[in-house]
Image (cartoon, rainbow, N blue to C red):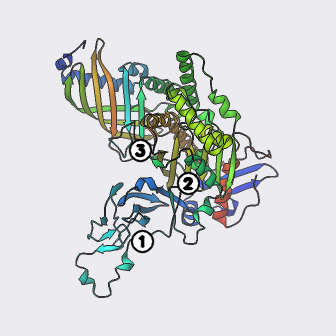
């Protein structure tokens, strides 16, 4: 195996940033990632709205571990390992549900949603030293939430979640401050497999450079919708989607490996940037939403909330894309060349049924495995993975924009900062470079 | 109603022949002709794998196309820039277990089972599930008023996407 110290070439003087492709193919690297990344940092497990009521639970796989995210009868959010402390069978065998207790089907041990072992058939046979408390469902080392997003860490020494999120907090706030009330996960998820290394989706999630070539058919579709709308309603201003995509915004590093690309949205946003897809009737409502946010936050922040499109990756694998709708995504390696992706949609609880329908519709134009763009991302990632079999071609390039003081649209600073954090965790060495 | 009651006269074999014809057009990538099978008020819906009863107005689904987006989907798939389908995959839409559940006015409610195979780059993907159709009898013959594709797979594994028309 290549030495982990030699996997990244980072030379800000020569504007060189290269990643060795063995990082995408090596089982040894994946084993190290499981130990040094997935067992060490904060990982997204779910949203509080998914377990709104006492007794609600969902099952998840996080960092390769089977977990249960549950709300107890006291209202507490608990995250347990989904394994019976007796012999190991998974306790929770449904994706979601509501229960006062969970019973293992194998020998019928029963646990309440605080994790207590409340039922053992013929418990007397275990004798007087039976350690009922010690056999409670095991909790993950740390569980903390920020504005509804629940994260876990298997590392008891991990820093507090707010410190870990750091610069990402502001971006989470921009998404959630779009509404006066709460946001919730919409029922239904997109779960799909990509036959590619998991890190390729981290890169792709905030890679602006691929947008136009990979998603040309999407931009054509948006342009045709606008042309139709102009025909139907007379002159309306065109956003010139592709042109605005190329010319605005920039990528930024948010610290701790997190990063973002932010730009003036070349598409409609349900809060609150009108597009022909929403229909004429929605126009005054969206304008009213924008005015409400101006009153609350002032013009600059309100415009940032309503008009900009934000693709954020929280290291290593949590994505919050507040773009034509708000998507929440996480992904996990199954092997060096395969990942499982789960994506949800986040929306205001108090949204009108019409606006909710328009939001869901806007999501589907681009996003999800049946959208006009996501299938082509899947293809791109699998194509990269296929190309990595040419092992003589050892390096991938992520140097775009290194020679500029300030990142420009479509530059790759945010991706370099992700990789630098990856390298730091894998090697224990703090990188000197920043550009 | 112009054709009130005429659906009563449509036999299951005619419905089957229509569905087989649709499958054949998809497998031959004759997508313009396929889109012509839909009425102007048509819907093509694919719910999420985890919420098969999902309602596109309230829940996250995979596809919710009206007539305009069906046409846009066809335009996209015919371009050389729908990368997941260029080069195009080979598909086989197998339609079985066809039942006409109701005939009312000029509309028929039809359920069928499907297996769709997709082959590309030495790789096989499959989709298995149930079709729910609302078919309408028009002057041009049977047309699709609604097509709902409920997948049996618990996730999009191995397919990774719904890049073809199911």
The reply to whether discs 2 and 3 touch (Cβ–Cβ < 8 Å) is no
* Of the image marks 2 and 1, the number of the one nearer the N terminus: 1
Rendered residue at 49%/27% (across/down): B77
| Relative side of A363 to A429, left or right | left
| Relative side of A319 to B137, left or right | right
Can you say whether A196 is above or below A236 in the image?
below
For mark 1, name the chain.
A
In the picture, the quarter occupied by the N terminus of chain A is: bottom right
Find residue A82 and report its image quarter: bottom left
| Relative side of B29 to B104, left or right | right
SS type, badge 1: loop
Residue A338: assigned label:
none
Residue farthest along the front direction in this orientation: A295
Can you say whether B12 is above or below A104 in the image?
above
How busy is the neighbourhood of tag 2: few (under 14 within 10 Å), some, or many (20 plus)?
many
Question: What number of labels is visible?
Answer: 3
Q: Nearer the viewer, mark 1 or mark 3?
A: 1
SS type, badge 2: loop
Pointer 2 residue: A317
SS type, badge 3: loop
Q: CA distance from mark 2 to mark 1?
A: 24 Å
How busy is the neighbourhood of tag 3: few (under 14 within 10 Å), some, or many (20 plus)?
many
Q: Nearer the viewer, mark 2 or mark 1?
A: 1
Pointer 3 residue: B156
Residue farthest along the bottom direction in this orientation: A128
Q: CA distance from mark 2 to mark 3?
A: 19 Å
Provide residue B126's location: percent of width, then percent of height.
37, 40
Provide residue A222's location: percent of width, then percent of height.
56, 27
Pointer 1 residue: A138
Rendered residue at 60%/21% (across/down): A236
Find residue A135 and report its image quarter: bottom left
């Amino acid at each position: 195996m290549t030495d982990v110290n030699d996997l990244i070439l980072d030379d800000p003087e020569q504007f060189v940033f290269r990643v060795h492709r063995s990082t995408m193919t090596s089982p040894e690297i994946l084993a190290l990632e499981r130990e040094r990344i997935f067992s060490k940092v904060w990982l997204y497990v779910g949203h509080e709205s998914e377990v709104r009521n006492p007794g609600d639970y969902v099952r998840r796989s996080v960092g390769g571990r089977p977990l249960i995210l549950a709300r107890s009868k006291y209202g507490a959010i608990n995250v347990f390992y989904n394994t019976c402390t007796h012999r190991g069978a998974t306790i929770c065998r449904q994706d979601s549900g509501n229960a006062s207790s969970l019973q293992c089907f194998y020998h019928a041990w029963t646990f309440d949603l605080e994790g207590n072992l409340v039922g053992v058939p013929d418990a007397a046979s275990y004798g007087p030293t039976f350690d009922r408390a010690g056999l409670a469902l095991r909790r993950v080392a740390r569980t903390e939430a920020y504005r509804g997003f629940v994260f876990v860490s298997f590392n008891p020494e991990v820093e507090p979640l707010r410190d870990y999120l750091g610069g990402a907090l502001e971006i989470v706030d921009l998404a959630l401050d779009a509404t006066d009330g709460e946001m919730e996960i919409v029922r239904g998820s997109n779960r799909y497999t990509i036959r590619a290394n998991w890190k390729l989706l981290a890169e792709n999630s905030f890679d602006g450079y691929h947008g136009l070539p990979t998603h040309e058919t999407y931009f054509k579709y948006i342009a045709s919708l606008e042309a139709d709308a102009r025909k139907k309603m007379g002159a309306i201003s065109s956003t010139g989607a592709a042109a605005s995509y190329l010319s605005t915004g920039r990528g930024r590093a948010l610290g701790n490996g997190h990063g973002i690309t932010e730009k003036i949205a070349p598409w409609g946003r349900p809060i609150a940037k009108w597009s022909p897809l929403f229909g004429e009737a929605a126009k005054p409502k969206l304008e009213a939403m924008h005015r409400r946010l101006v009153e609350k936050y002032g013009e600059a922040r309100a415009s940032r909330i309503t008009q900009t499109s934000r693709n954020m990756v929280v290291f290593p694998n949590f994505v919050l894309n507040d773009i034509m709708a708000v998507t929440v995504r996480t992904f996990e390696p199954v092997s060096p060349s395969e990942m499982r992706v789960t994506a949800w949609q986040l929306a205001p609880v108090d949204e009108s049924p019409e606006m909710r329908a328009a939001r869901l519709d806007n999501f589907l134009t681009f996003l999800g495995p049946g959208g006009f763009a996501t299938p082509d991302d899947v293809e791109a990632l699998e194509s990269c993975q296929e190309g990595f079999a040419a092992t003589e071609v050892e390096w991938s390039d992520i140097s775009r924009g290194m020679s500029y003081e300030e990142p420009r649209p479509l530059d790759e600073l945010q991706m370099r900062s992700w990789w630098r954090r990856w390298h730091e965790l894998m090697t224990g060495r703090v990188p000197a470079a920043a550009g | 109603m112009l054709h009130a009651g005429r659906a009563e006269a449509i036999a299951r074999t005619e419905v089957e022949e229509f569905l087989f014809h649709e499958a054949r057009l998809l497998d031959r990538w004759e997508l313009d002709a396929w889109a012509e099978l839909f009425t102007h008020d048509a819907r093509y819906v694919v719910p999420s794998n985890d919420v098969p009863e999902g309602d596109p107005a309230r829940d996250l689904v995979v596809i919710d196309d009206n007539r305009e987006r069906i046409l846009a989907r066809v335009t996209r798939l015919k371009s050389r820039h729908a990368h997941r389908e260029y080069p195009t995959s080979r598909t086989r839409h197998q339609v079985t277990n066809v039942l006409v559940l109701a005939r009312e006015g000029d509309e028929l409610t039809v359920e069928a089972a499907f297996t769709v195979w997709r082959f590309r780059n030495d790789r096989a993907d499959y989709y298995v599930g149930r079709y729910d159709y609302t078919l309408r009898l028009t002057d041009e013959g049977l047309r699709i008023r609604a097509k709902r594709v409920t997948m049996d797979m618990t996730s999009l594994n191995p397919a990774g996407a719904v890049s073809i028309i199911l």
